[in-house]
Image: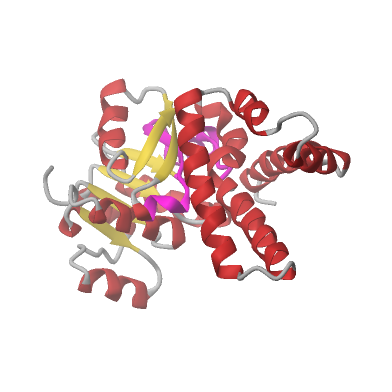
Amino acid sequence: MTPCTIGFIGAGHIAGAMIRGMVGSGKVAPEQIGVCDVNPASMERYAKAGHPTFSSIPELMKACPIVVLSVKPQNMGDVLPQVKDGLTPRTILVSVAAGVTAQRIKGVVGECNLILAMPNTPVELGRGAIALGRVEPTTVEQLEQVKALFSTCALVEEIPHEKMPEIIAVNGSSPAFVYRMADIVSKQAAGAGIDEGAALRLFCQTLIGSAEMMLRSGDPAALVAQVATPGGTTEAALAAMDAHGFAESLRAGMELCARRARELNQGK
């Protein structure tokens, strides 16, 4: 990889997680990742870490063949005209802005090489998941360039770019679902007289092992049946959760997540 392989417009939480994940992999050097952000303190921090920093979006785009749009959806209206000014035929745009469609981006910048992406914060640890959606006329080869970079810190899966609002609940927002569950479980354990830290560690390790079993099996429902023996404690717990609308609430949350993504695209 050549210097300034990739640049980030916006250096907030998810951009920072991706940058730290790529650098932490040892496969991408700090000098290969450029940054442009409106926050001077953020720019100074990245400069000290060895990243090239740029005072303007067009300047970054001239230096970086792959450019990640990592600003809030509400700020896209201000950023896209500047992106248009810096766009070159070689540029590959990657948008991680939740809900912002290819149509909206191209409506401002014009025809371009574009990939929509949905990462999650575990990319910081090199254990993340990133969904990518290729938008014509972006080539498969250009998609592979982006995959190669993102694969240094995440599992990468390709989906139709039109399904980005629906995928957010699967791997973008879902870490928060897991964190909420862990918080409830550990506090419930503490209320029963169990050390909260010990409960959290046990639950987290259980999540890690359960995830590995699901990846190997590919059949979560079958794994549920293996644990929930008839008349046992797990079956009783699942019955109580179902009675309180566990499945319905999760489905409703996923649907509202996608709906909110579409609203953000409309500037709401």
Q: Is residue 11 above or below residue 145?
A: below
Q: Is residue 81 left or right of residue 193?
A: left
| Residue found at the very far front of the displayed protein | 231
Camera-side residue of 141 and 228? 228
Residue 40 x %, y %: 35, 76
Quadrant location, the N terminus: top left
The quadrant holding residue 90 is top left
Q: Is residue 80 left or right of residue 90?
A: right
The number of numbered discs placed on residues in the rendered structure image is 0
| In the image: residue 19, left or right of residue 226 | left
What residue is drawn where x is 70% and y is 60%?
184
Looking at this view, is 201 or 258 the one in front?
201
Identity of the residue drawn at 75% across and 42% down: 233
Q: Quadrant of residue 143?
A: top left
Decide which of 47, 83 is in the foreground and name it: 47
| Whole-percent x, y for residue 55 in the image | 28, 66
Q: Which residues are magenta?
A: 96-124
> Residue 200 in the image: x percent, y percent?
56, 61
